[in-house]
Image (cartoon, helix red, strand yellow):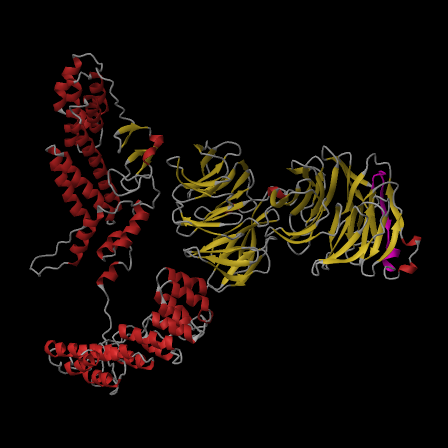
Amino acid sequence: MKTKFEIEGSKAKGICFHNKRPWVLVSFFSGNIAIYDYENGIEIQRYKDYFGPVRAVDFHTTDTLFASGGDDGCVRVYDFIKGYCITRFDDHKDYIRSVQFHSKLPLLVSSSDDQTVKIFNYKSKTLLYSIPAHDMIVMTASFHPSKPYIVTGSYDEKIMVWNISGLESKYNKPKEINFLDVLPKAQKQDNGCAITMASWHPTQDKIIISTTDNKLMLMNEKLDEIATVHAHTSTISAAKFMPQLEIIVSCSEDGTIKLLKQDSVRTIDTYTNPTKFWSISVHPYLPLIAASSNDGFKVLKICKNRPASLRISSGVYLYYNDEQIRKYDIKNQTNVVMCLSKNNTKKIPEKKPRKLIFNQSRNYLLIDYQNSFYLVDLELGTSNQKLKMEDGKSATFLSRTKYCYMSVSFNQLFIREIGKDEDAKIVRIPFNGKMFSGMNNTVYLCDKSKIMLFDLNKEQVIAETDVENCRDIILNKENRKIAVLTKDQILISKFDFSDKFAVNEAPKSGVWYSDIFVYTTKTYLMYALNNGEKGVLRSLPKQIYLLDLFEKEAIFIHPDSTFETLEVDLSECLFRNYLLNNDQNDALKMLTVSNKISMSNSNAYFAMEKGFPAVAKELCQDTKQKFEMAIESFDISSAERFLDLSDLEQVVKLAEISLICGRFREAEKYYSKANRTDKVAFIYLISGQISKLKDLMAKTEDLNLKMQIAIWLNDGNTLSALLESESPKLSEIAKTVIPSEISDRKVLDNWPTVEPKKVIVENTQINEKVSEEEDLVDESDGWQTENIEILIPENLTKSGDQIVPLRGRNIEESWTNNMMSPLSLVMCGKFSDALFELKDLIGLKNPIPLREIFTEFYISCHMSVENIKLPVKPVDILYVINNEIEEGFSYVKSGKFSVALYYFRNSLQKLSLSIDDIEKTSQMIYLCRTYCLAMEIGVKSNEIRKNDPKRHLELSLMMSMLNMNTEHHILAAQTALNTCIRMKCNLSASNLLKFLPDEVRNSSQFEKARSVLSKSELNDSLDVDFSPKKEICCSSLKYIQSTKKVICPFCKSTFSQDEKGNLCSICQLSEIGKISLGMK
């Protein structure tokens, strides 16, 4: 049992579920009554009519009513739609212990400390009958669900069943009711303990009775005892049946709630609380329990609502139902049993499987339970299947042949091969929680506060993030993105938790559709895009779970394991996703097939916000909005169509945009309409319309504008006249300074432009039923090139028409059509895209060294030379790199380590773009990495030779252990041996000879060293660290344990764990320890 909803605070007493709404009715010791929505976790209503404790409440099953009974002896009936009390009964003289509505008639029964049970007609607001039922406090009174019986229980140790058939027939005639209308049917005395509650089974003639001496008694309607069990260690406050799971639920003052099998009355689950439980309510349909206690109340979930299910192919699903694993084919409408479950899950709800995991290549299925699992071969069917339960949890497949599971109690993970029973490989893990399958032999480990991506090969954590109470992790088809589902949030990120964002919703299920995550909440089917934006696809009739998604329909599974197909329109989310991916063409195409998109103004604003005004213009319905979108996209002709001439602001805006676009005529027209003569004058000036400029100067009465135009025209007479009117001296100066009037120039027209072909978008519905003859070309036609007559109409082209040539196919585009590799992107000049691709492939962190390499490859693909009469000799990237490596070898031989390091590192960096031969590329990466490390050691060793002889010796020995070419290996080993002998470290020299490869050790150049060592004592004068079996940290150049290392995702150089996240010192490209896809 898990807590679904809880309120902590004052003491709660009565509690009851609504049978249809997600509500729970709670009464408190303080006198308040409240209605809560347990799905959304909010309070709906609160009533404060009582001044003392309210011990009992009950919802009506069909009407908008609930009843309550308090310590003031008053029974109240409320209407929660009206929000106030509609009926009140003051007939009890002491505390009221229970109230209950009749399922069909307008009757209400209550029990009280005044030793009576009273039956009311709440519609006529009358007391129908008062039953002097017991001699002490009457704790409980309950109507039979279908028969005219009432069961009562009291502190006088008696249980009684009353027949009220006479009363039910006269409920609307209270004056005709007499004492014979309510008669005792059965009673049981001297039970040896007080009765706290008696409750009917909803469909069977059984009663469950709770007592003060820790007993539960199961009886029939004649009060014949069926079973008795001591279920708790203190007084049992309440007990009720849960028929849908065939269990009994009880709560006690010992702070526990227990689930018991109905047939054997045996405990199968226990929930513990630090304070006493007072009352309990069972949901009539869902596996939910509500219990009141001293510190508030809780709503508990007994088992998962969602049945274990999964999609195995398009339209084919596996699911669990009624102790069977079944396969449902939605296209063929077949439903067959694949295997049987050995657990009696109908009787033990917590033993229902949590999850199904399918291995498509081997046709195996893992059925994962709480702390156990089954591995099932589906090809054997149901007859030959021998299921064996394994202890473990969170079982999942790692590959075609391997699966893994977690230990129940320890921080261990076990890896097994399918079909082999030998001992499993044990892997230590940081904690024991939940586990989900990842990619490339990785798993996600989850506890209450975080998720870790764990590499099973390296046995180490490679990424982690903080997420509370992860419920599920869903990978997309390419395994490059994940959606982490929690109780009230969805975290979407790349597989290594990078580029993550959260969506604040309470998800119930979800699937990936391309790179869009589609999920369900309690009432909606929704989607989340890559930037964190979300939207609603449709409402749901009830809480159902998404299994699969197609273009126009979605497949759901109900809690009762039935399937349902609902229509879904994905056009909006696909449209927005195209815009987010800067795919304007596909977005415009969608407008031709979906009226729903074009009618949505929100999508227009979305397109505008993302920088697509041309798309937004097609989506707008309002003329003003269309005008604004046309202005944003510099579409002058469209803006003219949507222009409101009465809006001066729009006119000026259109004139300004026309001027920016070089459309002088339109700019002059609209500036004139706006009476902006200064702007009109400026247009005349820049377009050379001098005569119009003179006319404007003569007509205008604005002295400042006249003077400005005169200056532009060098019109001395006009300027002198204007200046003379202001100051005579200035006019004399102007005559000597101002040159002669400028002559007319050629009048300029609008800037020459070629109008692009407009995208005409019509909101038409495309007929989905297109015949195959219209879609397919008849293959028998072939190329019919004979007797083809091409008719060109005479009026197709006219003199002076501009025929815009069609854009040819760019050779650069063809490079990226079939393969978007980093090298092809570099060849096209798309350097930023290549860097993003390298970030995913090799964990690129430092792109600076690739600048010259990118430029070199780009230029080599775009240069041309004059044709010469020689055969073509294609040169690939590996050929170029191999020449550089040979150059580096020559410098190694001459001992120029720093120069050789440059050549090997440059070759290694170029190999990040190689895709021609992955196997050969991997070999060359290993070679370059080895020599880069060797050269690093050589340079460092030469630097400290005089200042630190011991470290110089250690580096020489380290370099001699690297797997270089035989010639270079002999040179390194010879140097290390000579250094050891010179420093009197004969033991290290002897060990060096033992670890050298045979082809190096047997070289004649070591004969002298062997002779010297044979005549010397094998000891060291220095404490030398020589550990040839350990890994080398390429940063510190020290030995490390292989279990405590991290590697570069590109060159595979090893480092200590302290270097994680730093830049690799060998390739100087990648981030150490970053998880990546690898070269492909």
Query: Quadrant where the N terminus lies?
Result: top right
Q: Is residue 89 left or right of residue 1022?
A: right
Q: x and y percent of residue 537 in the render? A: 50, 62
Q: x and y percent of residue 105 in the render? A: 80, 59
Is residue 127 a member of the stretch shown in magenta? no
Q: Is 303 in front, or is 531? A: 531
Q: x and y percent of residue 414 in the render? A: 46, 35
Q: Residue furthest front?
A: 728
Instruction: Kindly indicate the quadrant of the structure image that contains residue 992.
Output: top left
Q: Is residue 259 left or right of residue 805?
A: right
Q: Residue at x 27, y 72 (%)?
A: 660
Q: Is residue 288 left or right of residue 673?
A: right
Is residue 162 a member of the stretch shown in magenta? yes
Magenta-colored span: 154-169
Q: Is residue 769 left or right of residue 123?
A: left
Confirm whether residue 775 shows in the render: no
Q: Does 739 appear above or below 363?
A: below
Q: Is 784 in front, or is 861? A: 861
Q: Residue furthest left?
A: 869
Figure disc tally: 0
Confirm whether residue 526 shows in the render: yes
Q: x and y percent of residue 778 in the render? A: 35, 72
Q: Does 347 appear above or below 580?
A: above
Q: Does 317 appear above or below 386?
A: below
Q: Residue at x 24, y 59 (%)?
A: 815
Q: Is 832 in front, or is 439? A: 832
